Amino acid sequence: MSLEGKKLGFIGTGKMGSALIKGICNAGLFSPSGVYASDLYEPSLDELKQSAGVNVSTDNAATVINSDIIVLAVKPQILKKVIAGIKEDIGSDKLVISIAAGVKLADIEREFNEGTRVIRVMPNIAATVAEAASAITQGSNASKEDAEDALAIFGSVGSAIQVPENLMDAVTGLSGSGPAYIFPVIEAMADGAVYEGLDRKSALVLAAQTVLGAAKMALETETHPGELKDMVTSPAGTTIRGIKVLEEYGIRSAFMQAVIESSNRSKELGK
C-alpha cells in the first residue's frame, strides 16, 4: 500500500477532525506516533493526546513539516487564513486533503503555490464509530495514487467513493449533513414507543438498532429500498398503517427538501 511509512497530519481538531483522527487510529491505518494534529484550542489537543496518543501542537507549521499527508479540517470561513500560514511549507512531496464544506478545488489550489497536490473530501461525523460515508474528488495536480490514498484513509472509517467535483455539493447535502436528519428520526420513533408505555432506554436502543439494521439491509442486499419496504408491509397490517401516516405528513418531500436545501447552502459557502 502506498500509505506505508507515511505520516498523517490534521490541522483542526474540532468535532469532525477529532472524530476522523480517532477513527483512523482505531482502524490501525496509521499508528498514533505517525499522526500529528494542531489547533489553537488546547483543551481539544489535550483530550486527543490522552485518548488517541497522537502528537499535538498549537503550531500548524510543525504539523505540516512532520507530515506527508495533511488534512485541512477547518471551517470554510477560515480556510484561506490557515493556508496562508502553511503554504510555504507545502512542497510537491506533500498531499493536501481539504474537508472544508463547499470550497472548490480551484479555489483551494489558487491559495497554494503552483503544483500543490490537493484532494477534496466530504466525510461525515459517523467516522467516530467507523461508519462514515465519504466522497472524494481529486485536484488538477493530484495523481491516481493520491486519490487511492485518500480513499484508503477515509475508507478505513466507513465507506468512501470517488465522484466528480460538480456532485460534491449534493454529497454534502446527503451524507455530510445526513446524520443530523436521522438523529431526530431515532428520537421521534423512541418518543412514540415511550408514549405507548416503553421505557426511554429500551425505546432508544430499539429505534437506533432498527435504523442501523435497515441501513445494513439496504447496503448488503443491494435491493431497492422500495422492495425492502414491501417485504415488511403486509396487506392491512401494522406497517402499512404507519406508512400511510408518514406519507400523509410528507416524509419523502421533507427528506428530499432537506438534502436539496443543505446542498444549496454548500454552494453558497463555496462562493
Image: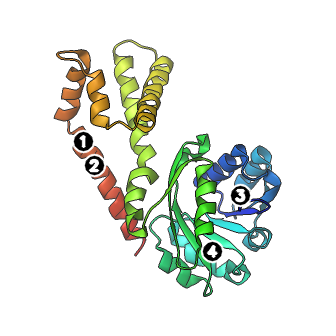
Relative to 210, 157 lies left or right: right
Q: Nearer the viewer, mark 4 or mark 3?
A: 3
* Residue type for callout 4: Val
Q: Position of residue 35 (x, y in %)?
A: 76, 58
Q: Residues within 10 Å of mark 4 (few under 14, many from 20)?
A: some
Q: Are marks 4 and 3 in contact (CB under 8 Å)?
A: no
Q: Nearer the viewer, mark 3 or mark 1?
A: 3
Residue drawn at point x = 63 percent, y = 52 percent: 20
Q: Nearer the viewer, residue 81 or 35?
A: 35
Q: Quadrant of the C terminus?
A: bottom left
Mark sitting earlier along the chain (2/3): 3
Q: Position of residue 175 (x, y in %)?
A: 43, 50
Which corner quadrant of the image does residue 51 belong to? top right
How far is disc 4 from disc 1 in space, using C-alphas?
A: 40 Å
Q: Is residue 64 above or below residue 129?
A: below
Q: Position of residue 245 (x, y in %)?
A: 20, 28
Q: Which mark is residue 82?
A: 4
- Residue bearing the label numbered 3: 1
